[in-house]
Amino acid sequence: MHRRTKWTAALLAALCAILLGLLGTGGTAGTAQAAPPVPQGIDNGTQFTTVDDKPLHAHGGGVIKVGSFYYWFGENRDDKNQFRAVSVYRSTDLKNWSFRNDVLTAASHPELKNANIERPKVIYNKRSGKFVMWMHKEHADHYVEARAAVATSSTVDGDYTWDRSFRPEGHMSRDITTFVDTDGTGYMISAANENADLHVYRLNADYTDVQSLVQKLWVGQKREAPAMFKRGGVYFLLTSGCTGWAPNQQQYSTATRISGEWSELRNIGDSTAYRSQTAFVLPVQGVKGTGWLYMGDRWGNSMGGKVNDSQYVWLPLKFPTSTTMTMEYTPRIVIDTARGTVEPMKGTWEILTTRNGAKCANVPRADVKKGVGLIQWDCDGHVNQEFRIRKQLNGYHEIMLRHSGKCLDVSDSSAENGAPAVQNTCDGRPSQQWLIKKTDAPGYVRLIARHSGKCLDVVNQSTDNGAALEQWTCNGGHNQHWKRTTR
């Protein structure tokens, strides 16, 4: 009896250890579970951090859901802007992320010692029970290899074993994504022919090799940063143009068969995709349906920095018809992974136009930093000229800039004439509270700062582009008259 008790206890302990191990590494698809998540607000144009307040580096990445958890893989560079690791993070609500592992590093294989790894995407193969990572591989010192690469793991966030890098069917392969169809067929899509074309490859049964080239899309049109998804029997392929690190107009196409005819490219978002580039499109499936999340990178290199300085731009995708989609900018999104919804910030966006120059209040270069001064500029329809004006309980108004999510403020809360109007983190201070008063001119108002009693003004009554906005003693001048127009 004593021996049997000891044997039973040992067996239970071993089973518990195995179970804990599976939960710790994600196990196979569907293993890990967690408490139901609650809706989360996520600020755009920021550098995300983990739950322990460390930088989250998953640039150019992709997401796979395993059980109740979302696993986010992406690029993590070193101080020289070169490959350090493919890092993976885990979350149930898409806001609170925990670092799990550097699943692939320069020490993982000799071929990675002097390499750059870009746009890692992970898919799960039911036949082999393996998680398969596809990525774009280059040499650390040049950009001429143009190779696809594969690595595998038996657990989603365990160490990945390097397989090889190669040119699929002899073709160059750069920006890359993967897609698993509802019938289990795997695909890899990558930029080819010096980024002039986009190739769609069918994968073999284990997803570890290319079986055939299915499509050459948009030959010579220079499309990169692909993201493919399927909605209601329609395939969508979202891509960007090729302009280096600089953002550009993104476009999409649709088809009813991957190997069939694809539609003409259609524009989506503004001319710079709100200063971002496609990384991934994630279906957020819940009890009420599926929300579609655009995941983009605002590359640090486009702002004078490096990859690890990049910010994230996440936006809801909406579908007016079965074959069309739209993407509007919002400084904050609300994601409910339990319900399956991805929604923009509520509110109406307006432009503010000066009476004397008929120009729009504007943040230069769509800068998102705190303390940046506002100017007037020709009205051009960009989001750095749009504001949400929301009345507070005290009768004053908070005026939020759409592109940055920051509030109209007076620099240093100064009460002096000529103090610049700036954008700052919204915190409700009196210099961010504005009284809106009608003028004697129909349709125009004055904006009066609570802390100083002074009016929002265009310096020296200028009508020139670039003239600064400031506060000045209210005097009835046309340079203190503003027209509110709903977008």
Image (cartoon, grey):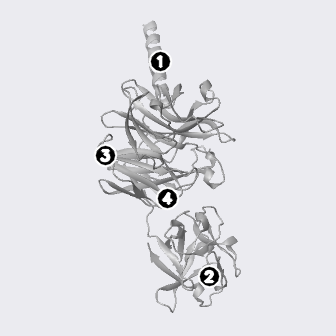
Q: CA distance from mark 4 to mark 1?
A: 46 Å
Q: Amino acid at mark 4?
A: Arg
Which residue does the image show at 50% across and 85% down from the upper left?
A: 444
Q: Earlier in the sequence, mark 1 or mark 3?
A: 1
Residue annotated with mark 3: 261
Q: Earlier in the sequence, mark 2 or mark 1?
A: 1
Q: Amino acid at mark 1?
A: Ala
Which quarter of the rendering shows the N terminus? Answer: top left
Question: SS of the residue at dot 1?
Answer: helix
Q: Nearer the viewer, mark 2 or mark 1?
A: 2
Q: Would residue 97 be visible to someone looking at this image? A: yes
Q: CA distance from mark 3 to mark 4?
A: 36 Å
Disc sitting over residue 14 in the figure = 1
Question: SS of the residue at dot 4?
Answer: strand
Q: Earlier in the sequence, mark 4 or mark 2?
A: 4
The answer to whether mark 4 and mark 1 are in CB contact below 8 A is: no
